[in-house]
Amino acid sequence: MATTSNAFIKSYIRPAGHGRFKGRFKGLLFSVVISALLTLTPAFAQDQERQLDERDWVLGNVLTFMLHEVGHGLVALWALPVLGREEDAVDSFAVTYLLDTIAQDKSLGPEKIEQLDDALFVAAGAWLAFAEESDVEDVSLYADEHSLDMQRFFAHMCLLVGREPDVYGSWLDDFQIDADTLDVERCEETALLQAEDWRYLLEVERDESWKDQGRRGLTVVIERGKTKAHRRFEGWLKDWPWLGYFEQRLESDLKLPEPLTLRFGACDEANAYYDHEAREVVICYELMADLEALF
Ligand SMILES: [Zn+2]
């Protein structure tokens, strides 16, 4: 904690009444992030009016949550040995897979890459926001299977700047992380190792004979929302091109020993999880509502 700037935390993370993140996050975007993104994407530089809205915020986070849960699915379906916290390993999968997508898919233009960068950016913002909300006095936090949200924030940033210091290095300034805080050289080693290991696992040959039956490896299901708010999320998801994109990309990249469903719907809790019995990744509309409330 001593590592991130207290000024940043105070400016953007401390609650300031209702809709606190709206003010903080938009302030953040206006003041520092726009200038950072300007340097990333020439196309964006011509459109300085652009700002991320609640839909970008929610869906960007949904993307990283979804890939995190797909990571849990891979650990279970591939019966991977996990020598450490599985939660950390699948956080790494989500970021690594997104960065590999940006690096490998040459059909993505600057605008699309910017959208994926936005998703990585809002995910970092969400870890900070969650860290702010967490009760550090509650000892059970330290016994949880997940690393602390502030640790997840730094692990996320470490993979980004470690992988592409020229692209994401400026985000350290945006989040007011000083040079002594995050060891970029160590992050370069960490990011390389994790990317190589996840790529290796993606390439291992697996029995996919079930595919001969003509079944799809990956299926996205968007359930009908029963409330106005959930129907809005349903509409967002149906209009969101990245869902179809990643459905296809994961389908071709993952050598799944059996089919996997990505289900979006109501589940009476704000959660996202992998259900091994059903072979399903579930992203709850309630989680999307919580994310929106955080904005
Ligand atoms: Zn998890």
Image: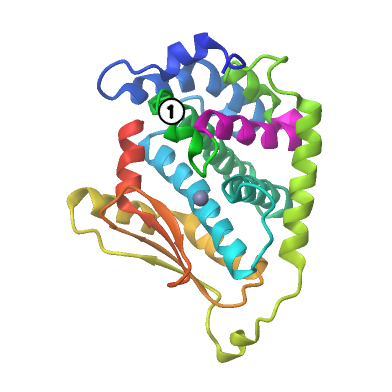
Q: Residue 119: give x, y in percent of width and height.
A: 52, 40
Amino acid carrying mark 1 in the image:
Ala
Badge 1 residue CB within 8 Å of ligand 1:
no
Q: Is residue 67 magenta?
A: no
The answer to whether residue 205 is visible is yes
- Report the span colored magenta: 148-167
Q: Residue 130: give x, y in percent of width and height.
A: 43, 31
Q: Residue 197: give x, y in percent of width and height.
A: 77, 54
> Callout 1: helix, strand or loop?
helix
Is 186 situated left or right of 71 in this image? right
Q: Which residue is mark 1?
A: 129
Residue 213 falls in which quadrant of the image? bottom right
Is 257 situated left or right of 61 in this image? right
**In the image, residue 136 above or below residue 292:** above
Residue at the (72%, 14%) spot, across then down: 180
**In the image, residue 135 above or below residue 144:** above
Q: Residues within 10 Å of mark 1 (few under 14, many from 20)?
A: many
Q: Is residue 150 magenta?
A: yes
In the image shown, does 67 or 59 lie closer to the viewer?
A: 67
Main SS, magenta region, reads helix
In the image shown, does 234 or 192 lie closer to the viewer?
A: 192
Q: Residue 177: give x, y in percent of width and height.
A: 63, 17
